[in-house]
Amino acid sequence: VFALAANGLDIYAGGSFLNMDSIVVADRLAKWNGTTLVWTAMSTGANDQVSALMFGPDGGLYIGGAFETLGGISMNSIGKWNGVSFSPIGSANALAAANLVDDIIFTPDGTMYISGLFNTVFGSGFPSAIARFDGSNFLPIGIDLPGSGEEVIGMEISPSGEIYFGFNTTGTATVATT
């Protein structure tokens, strides 16, 4: 299990596991029902690793990882669960295949940021592995990380809206003026 998210008594788990609690279709994504005290499948799960889970301001569960499908629906590395079904965020191919979303956060105003290991979003290279979702597209945020192949593993937002991030490289990040 790489990620957990809670909603009331229910707990959602994401990772690289197969058949959570012997449920055949509970692959890499499952829900612990805090009322009935049993694991349940979320459709057919993910076809690859789930590493980020975060409830958004709209109540949806946002899911990031290295997958290409959620519940059998094409979406590269990021998607949303509305409690019944999955849907892509932006374009189904907003992130190129073989990317990894490690973290998802929302600012107080509801803006979504993702981080991980990706270089291509909507066909254009990013200066770093952090992007902001504007409601339709993922956009770079103007941070240049040293080295190549950098991975932003985790993010946190302060009460004043500043974003802190941890990355897997050496050197110092440079913030561009945007």
Image (cartoon, helix red, strand yellow):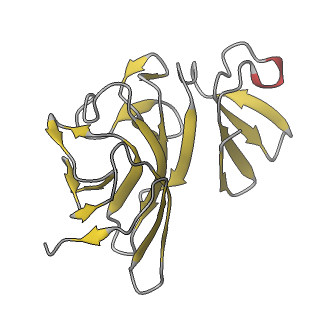
Q: Which quadrant of the figure contains the C terminus?
A: bottom left
Image-based side of 42 in relation to 118, left or right:
right
Residue at image position (33%, 73%) is: 109
Of all residues, the one furthest to the top in this rendering is 24
177 relative position to 92: left or right: left
- Identify the image quadrant of residue 95: top left
Q: How many marks?
A: 0
Up the image or down, 164 lies above or below 122; here it is: below
- Quarter of the rendering containing residue 132: bottom left
Which residue is pictured at 38% across the width and 69% down the height? 172
- Compare residues 118 and 147 and report the one nearer the observer: 147
Q: Is residue 70 above or below residue 145?
A: above
Residue 82 location (% of width, % of height): 47, 41
Q: Residue furthest right?
A: 37
Q: Is residue 60 visible?
A: no
Q: Nearer the viewer, residue 152 or 131?
A: 152
Res. 175 visible in picture: yes
| Residue at the image point whose x is 38% and y is 80% from the top | 161
Rendering coords of residue 106 (x, y %) = 41, 64
Residue 1, horizontal then vertical, whole percent: 71, 38
Residue drawn at (47%, 84%) of the image: 159
Q: Quadrant of residue 101?
A: top left
In this orientation, which residue lies closer to the viewer: 77 or 153? 153
Left/right placement of residue 133 relative to residue 41 reads: left
Give residue 99's position: percent from left, percent from top: 38, 33
